[in-house]
Structure formats: C-alpha cells, structure tokens
C-alpha cells in the first residue's frame, strides 16, 4: 500500500495540470502530414525540431500562431552530437517553469532524436561502434527523458516515422504484416507504452484528392489507441486536427472545460 507521503507527492505533482493535458505519440509514414498536424495544436507551442525538414514545414505558420520553433537541434551530427547540450537546455526550461506556462511541447521527430543520442554515446566513449552495453544505456536514457516529457504540466507530443514490416511469402511475393517505428533496430525500446494517446496518420485517394485522417484505434496492421476518446467518443478515423479532437471531447462531456 502506498504511504500517505507518496500519495501527497503524487497529488502535488498533478494539482496544476490542466484537464485537457495529455501525452501523444503521433505516428505516420513519410509524407502523411505529421509535422503539418502540429499547427492545429491550440494555444502556445514550443517545438524542438530535430528533423532537418521539420522547421521548414511549419515556419510559415509561426507568425499566425503562438508557436516557437527551436531548430538548432537539427544541426546535431555524428561529429558534433547535441544530446548533452539539448538535455541541459531542457532542464533549464523545467527550472524556469516554462512548461508550466505554455500549452504544448513537441519533439519532432523521434527518429532523429534517438539518432542524436546514439551519436552522443559514441562521441562520449570515443568509439565508432556501439558495444552491447551501450544499447542498454541508450534505451534507459531515452526512456527516462520521454517519461520526464510525459510528466510535464503541458501537453507533450512526440512525432515518429513508421515503416512497414514485410513478410516474404512462398511464391517470393511480399505482404505487409505490421509497422514499426523508424529507429535503429538494435534500440529495443517500446516507447508507445509511455503515451496515453497514440494517433496514426494515414492517407487515401478520393477522386483526384489525397485525404488525410488519423486512426485512434488499431486497424489492420497499424498501431493506435486513445484513452481520452475511448468508449466511442472518437471514431476510428478522425480529422487530423488537435483542436477539433479536443472540442469533440468537450462537446461529448468527456473532458472538463
């Protein structure tokens, strides 16, 4: 049984969290509109961009919204990794209570974020190849950082690229049996378990138009889940718009005003 002191600590930790806060893993194959969907976040947003093309996609919306894009992390590379520098900056933002006073914090994207940490460990240990223990250290570091992000007093969104998992059939043809997050395959880290919401962006062609939607639950070989919109509040396919989703939750009484 939890001690009273422990319960008080939990209560203190969450007493100032807004009722519509959540942590979301935003999945999608390349070109499905993950980064573009970030412009639909309501309120003030800080984006740490690690994806070399991410800031370019959103830059034109900065003047129209309360959006700040910090893209210096896109310069991280194998010769000069920026993981240690980023974590110091992240901790400074926590100490200065920045996350207490904004609505959304975004890391875009996990693929480049995790590669930054791989390069950092190689650099810190002065070696070109990872050893077995390095993968365990890396997994622990990234997991702890993401847990810190999910515990912030603002919404936290992590974007991640996914790629299909193919199976070769007896006739040498291939079929897609699932999807996996694009990262180094030796990094065995089940990050979806850290998030309350997992949305997966998909595209389909309707006539001559490409229609983008998000999945809110498992469908075929795609991963998705929702706790906020469970019980039929969200449809299986929804409009890829965070403001729309929050308004739908409120209109159905699934979220406090």
Image (tube, helix red, strand yellow):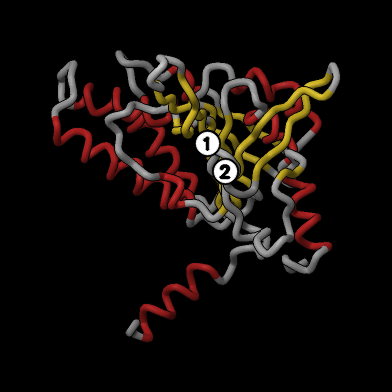
Say whether residue 95 is visible.
no
Viewport quadrant of the C terminus: bottom right
Total count of labels: 2
The residue indicated by pointer 1 is: 107
Where residue 252 sits, quadrant-wise, is bottom right
Q: Residue at x 51, y 28 (%)?
A: 161
Q: Residue at x 42, y 46 (%)?
A: 146
Q: Residues within 10 Å of mark 2 (few under 14, many from 20)?
A: many
Q: CA distance from mark 2 to mark 1?
A: 7 Å
Q: Residue at x 79, y 62 (%)?
A: 250
Determine contact: label 2, label 1, CB under 8 Å.
Answer: yes
Where residue 210 sits, quadrant-wise, is top right
Viewport quadrant of the N terminus: bottom left
- Tell me the number on the disc at residue 90: none
Say whether residue 236 is visible.
yes
Residue 62 in the image, given as x and y percentages of width and height: 73, 28
Q: Is residue 136 above or below residue 34?
A: below
Residue 42 in the image, given as x and y percentages of width and height: 74, 46
SS under mark 1:
strand
For marks 2 and 1, the one nearer the N-term is: 1
Residue 253 in the image, given as x and y percentages of width and height: 78, 69
The residue indicated by pointer 2 is: 157
Q: Residue at x 64, y 17 (%)?
A: 56
Side of 229 relative to 86 (left or right): right
- Who is closer to the viewer here, 162 or 48? 162
Q: Residues within 10 Å of mark 1 (few under 14, many from 20)?
A: many
Q: Is residue 147 above or below residue 18?
A: above
Residue 163 in the image, given as x and y percentages of width and height: 49, 26
Q: Is residue 65 above or below residue 237?
A: above
Q: Is residue 157 above or below residue 201?
A: below
- Who is closer to the viewer here, 31 or 55? 31
SS under mark 2:
strand
């Amino acid at each position: 049984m939890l001690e009273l002191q422990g319960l008080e600590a939990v209560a203190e930790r969450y007493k100032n969290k807004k009722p519509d806060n959540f942590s979301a893993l935003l999945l999608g194959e390349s070109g499905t509109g993950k980064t573009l969907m970030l412009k639909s976040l309501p309120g003030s947003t800080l984006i740490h961009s690690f994806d070399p093309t991410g800031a370019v996609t959103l830059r034109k919306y900065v003047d129209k919204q309360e959006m700040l894009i910090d893209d210096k992390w896109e310069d991280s590379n194998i010769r000069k990794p920026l993981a240690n520098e980023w974590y110091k900056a992240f901790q400074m933002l926590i100490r200065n209570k920045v996350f207490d006073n904004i609505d959304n914090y975004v890391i875009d994207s996990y693929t480049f974020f995790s590669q930054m940490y791989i390069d950092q460990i190689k650099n810190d240990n002065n070696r070109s190849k990872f050893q077995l223990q390095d993968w365990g250290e890396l997994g622990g570091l990234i997991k702890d950082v993401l847990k810190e992000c999910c515990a912030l007093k603002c919404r936290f969104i992590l974007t991640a690229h996914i790629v299909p998992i193919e199976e070769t059939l007896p006739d040498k043809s291939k079929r897609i049996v699932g999807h996996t997050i694009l990262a180094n395959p030796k990094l065995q880290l089940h990050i979806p378990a850290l998030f309350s919401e997992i949305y997966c962006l998909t595209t389909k062609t309707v006539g001559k138009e490409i229609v983008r939607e998000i999945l809110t639950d498992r469908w075929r070989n795609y991963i998705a889940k929702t706790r906020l919109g469970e019980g039929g509040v969200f449809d299986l396919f929804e409009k890829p718009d965070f403001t729309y989703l929050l308004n739908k939750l409120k209109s159905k009484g699934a979220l406090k005003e």
